[in-house]
Amino acid sequence: MKRANANPRSSRMASDARIAEVEAAFADNYIVYQYHAVEFIVGHLADLSKQFRGDLQQMLVLAIIGQMELHHRLTHADPSEASRPSIGASRIADVTGIPRQTVRRKLASLSERGWIEANGAALWRLKIVDASAPARTDLSEVDRRKMRRLAELYASLETLVHDG
């Protein structure tokens, strides 16, 4: 199985010229670009809304915690438990605009689901059991559909750049 470059800097290494080329192709074909982009977003958000029982704020809180874990795994060779990142409710509230008390309720709910765990004084991180995240396991079907949608989105938008 081919893995993407494990260095997040690789995404920043894309040339400004290539980004401008893609952006121009999207602008030139705005209706097609917009249709496919919205189709992806709506489909994925609908899946998430079902999985999170309509609570997209809870999904957003989990996404921030999960993204921290992913970033850490991509940028650190040390996978030890002690080096894993944690985040507090205040920081999540700052990033999302969700009130801190609401974030705390979402954190408690995610903890009850077994997806996150407290790590120290009011800090939270993704729960890992036997080198696997229960959240990933529980959300695997949503993730599979997202991967398919992303592949379809990529294939659709790639034609705008190459054939546009």
Image: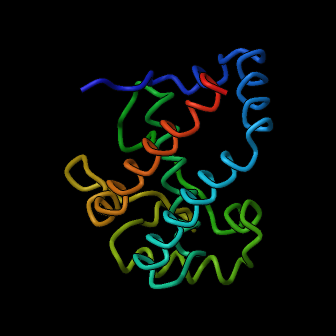
Q: Is residue 137 above or below residue 156?
A: below
Point out the image quarter for the C terminus.
Answer: top right
At x 60%, y 22%, the residue is 162
At x 36%, y 34%, the residue is 79
Q: Position of residue 33 (x, y in %)?
A: 67, 45
Q: Nearer the viewer, residue 58 or 131?
A: 58
Q: Is residue 40 left or right of residue 141?
A: right
- Which quarter of the figure has residue 52? bottom left
Q: Position of residue 11 (x, y in %)?
A: 60, 25
Q: Nearer the viewer, residue 116 or 8?
A: 8
Q: How is the image coloured?
A: rainbow
At x 41%, y 25%, the residue is 4
Q: Nearer the viewer, residue 143 or 93?
A: 143
Q: Is residue 20 left or right of residue 141?
A: right
Q: Is residue 49 above or below residue 69?
A: below
- Which quarter of the figure has residue 53? bottom left
Q: Position of residue 51 (x, y in %)?
A: 40, 76
Q: Nearer the viewer, residue 97 or 121?
A: 97
- Which quarter of the figure has residue 82? top left
At x 71%, y 27%, the residue is 22
